[in-house]
Amino acid sequence: ALASVVIRMPKLEDALKEAAETTAKDDKSFMSDCPGILTKLKRGISEIKKSPELLDQVPADIDAWPFLLRVASEKASFAKQIWETCIVLLGSAAWARSFAAQERKERLSLVKATPRDAGLAAEVAAKALATGAVAELGELVPTDAVGCMDPAACVVFLDQLQGQSLPAGTVEAVLESEVGRCLAERGAAGPAAGEARRKVVAPDTKDSFGKGDNLPIYVCEGISGSHQKMEIKKGL
């Protein structure tokens, strides 16, 4: 007797099909279904990482990119997971071609990367450039959005992008492009707005102040010492 052969469907395929079906749902249903689908996607990606050959069994005609783009743009807390998913999918030439056909690729929200995960965002960009999923970095990082990025994240992003396995010509083209120059300029701009020294309003010698009084301003110069002593000096 012939032994039966069991063909196992990759977990990722099932998760992506469910994701594709969810994209067009109304906001309430979409947000409700999202967590469960993302959990399934995470398991599917984990399986592919262990057995990369399974990605070849995941049909690229599953229309799941709109779901991934929508989640990345609307649910910032899941952006990192979406980026990790993109890196795996872009490892397939068929999936890369499928991504190339998508509109508004900037919805991946790479511009929202923090210094901690900017390296991951750079890996997504590098993968997309290397596979031809995007023709230029500006498709993922619009020039007019760079001004909203954390300067430190811009530095990490460019540094990590140059460290990826990209042809020298591609890296040079990115650095010389308008968005590349904007990223470099933004990175040199200094600390992000949220990192500016905090000004604290505090009483001087009066116990209370009237409507027309000038309130003294104190500036936090930093926190130091084993007991995290806050150093405060009176400002102008």
Image (cartoon, rainbow, N blue to C red):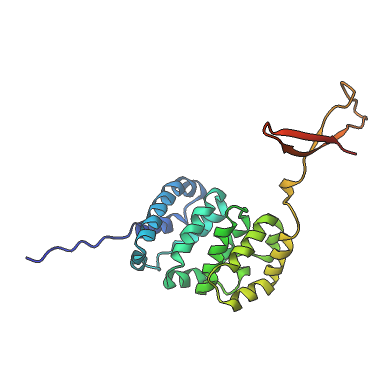
- Residue with the most extreme left position: 1
Q: Quick one: 9 or 118, which is closer to the camera?
A: 118
Number of disc labels: 0
Q: Can residue 101 be seen in this view?
A: no
For residue 109, which quarter of the picture?
bottom right
Tell me the residue at 42%/70% (across/down): 92
Give the quarter of the figure containing the C terminus. Answer: top right
Give the quarter of the figure containing the N terminus. Answer: bottom left
Tell me the residue at 62%/61% (across/down): 157
Residue 29 point in image, percent of width and height? 46, 47
Q: Is residue 75 visible?
A: yes
Tell me the residue at 75%/55% (across/down): 190
For residue 145, which quarter of the picture?
bottom right
- Residue with the most extreme top position: 207
For residue 136, which quarter of the picture?
bottom right
Tell me the residue at 38%/52% (across/down): 43
Residue 114 point in image, percent of width and height? 62, 53
Residue 216 point in image, percent of width and height? 88, 32
- Residue with the most extreme front position: 226
Residue 45 left/right relative to 165: left
Residue 186 left/right relative to 70: right
Residue 60 point in image, percent of width and height? 40, 68
Q: Quick one: 111 or 162, which is closer to the camera?
A: 162
Residue 228 left/right relative to 131: right
